[in-house]
Amino acid sequence: MTDPVDPDRPPEPGPRPDPVDVGEVEAVNQAFYTAFEQGDVDAMRALWADEPDALCVHPGALPLRGTSAINRSWALVMASTPYIQFFLTDVEVAVRGDVAAVTCSENVLTAHEDTDASSFGGGKAVATNVFVRTPDGWRLWIHHASPVVSGGHDEHE
């Protein structure tokens, strides 16, 4: 019989991710947001892993599976988004072997075609982007963004 795990004991340190991997993942993550901001469908397609189990969840939408469905969704989103800019905060990167995860807050500034130049909309979402290492470099495998509809959570709950 083994002793129960002490919940107060700090976790055992795992292998530290290679700083080169972390930098590469950060660059691909930024390329994802740049492609979206620029409405560059081709750049967005190039970032995604060509996998039937690739997954994309746009804020407030149902999950999309497979690269073809995901690419179609980005084309539609970009066609209906004349202006969008992201200010990423709380960015954290974790790399474990050939899989990496980036979590962040997406602080979004947007405008529509009929919006006056002095009027912009804003919002916030939290996102998880999961990347896999391929022979062609890191590729996006999963993107999940959820809108933030509250002012945050109370740490005393």
Image (cartoon, grey):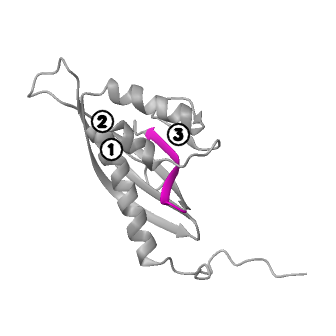
Left or right of 57 on screen, residue 110: left
In this view, the residue in front, 63 or 9, is 63
Instruction: Residue 115 in the image: state x and y as whole percent.
Output: 16, 21
Q: Is residue 131 left or right of residue 76?
A: right
Residue bearing mark 1: 35
Residue underneath mark 2: 39
Q: Position of residue 18 (x, y in %)?
A: 47, 78
Badge 3 crowding class, 10 Å Cα cut-off, few under 14, some 14 to 19, many 20 or more, is: many
Label 2, label 1: how far apart the Cα atoms are: 6 Å
- Give the amino acid at mark 1: Ala
From which residue to which does the magenta span run? 135-146
Q: Earlier in the sequence, mark 2 or mark 3?
A: 2
Circle on res. 59: none
Is 83 placed left or right of 31 in the picture? left
- The answer to if 143 sits in the magenta stretch is yes
Q: Is residue 125 visible?
A: no
